[in-house]
Amino acid sequence: METSFQVRCAYRNEWQEAMTLAWQTFLRFEADVYTPEGVKNFENFVTDSTLYRMFIMGNYQLFVAVMRNRIVGMITLRDSTHISLLFVDERYHRQGIGRALIRYLADYLATEVGAGRMTVNASPYGVEFYHRMGFRDLGPETTRDGIIYTPMEFIL
């Protein structure tokens, strides 16, 4: 399988493809440990038109990993330094795409934003990935509005 991909800022017309990737990957790997309320809240989040407007205005950033003009991974940034969503198409797991997205974001935050850290509320499925990337837990696993997460940070 080809593993050559490019990580870059997303174009406006790529929003729906990226959110569809997030939703489908969530359903495949995460939804089974969430309550129905959590699944619905996640769906509401990735289909929220306000979130899209924030993206258009530059207040919610989306970066993508692209292979042959197709999005194979995505990561979003809110509140300047917080990873909001990180998903990789299941056909491309364990090929360095998630790692490349994190590295791209870390470089962006350090050089363009001048940030000293980034944070994430890691899903149960993502906790070990974030640990391997060097994130450390800021607290115990928590559930809010049916969404299960572990707060973490990475020092840049």
Image (tube, helix red, strand yellow):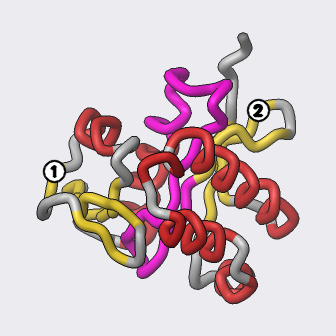
- Front residue of 31/114: it is 31
**Residue sitting at the far front:** 36
Amino acid found under the numbered disc labelled 1: Arg
Residue found at x 39% / y 42% = 125
Element type at marker 1?
strand
Q: Position of residue 86 (x, y in %)?
A: 51, 52
Q: Position of residue 96 (x, y in %)?
A: 50, 27
Q: Quadrant of residue 91?
A: top right
- Range shown magenta: 75-100
Residue found at x 56% / y 47% = 87
Element type at marker 2?
strand
Kindly check if marks 1 and 2 are in contact, taking CB atoms under 8 A apart as contact. no
Q: Which mark is residue 136?
A: 1
Q: Quadrant of residue 114?
A: bottom left
Q: Quadrant of residue 131?
A: top left
Q: Report the Cα–Cα distance between label 1 and label 2.
A: 30 Å
The crowd level at tag 2 (other Cα within 10 Å; few <14, some 14-19, many 20+) is: some
Reading the image, the residue beneath label 2 is 67
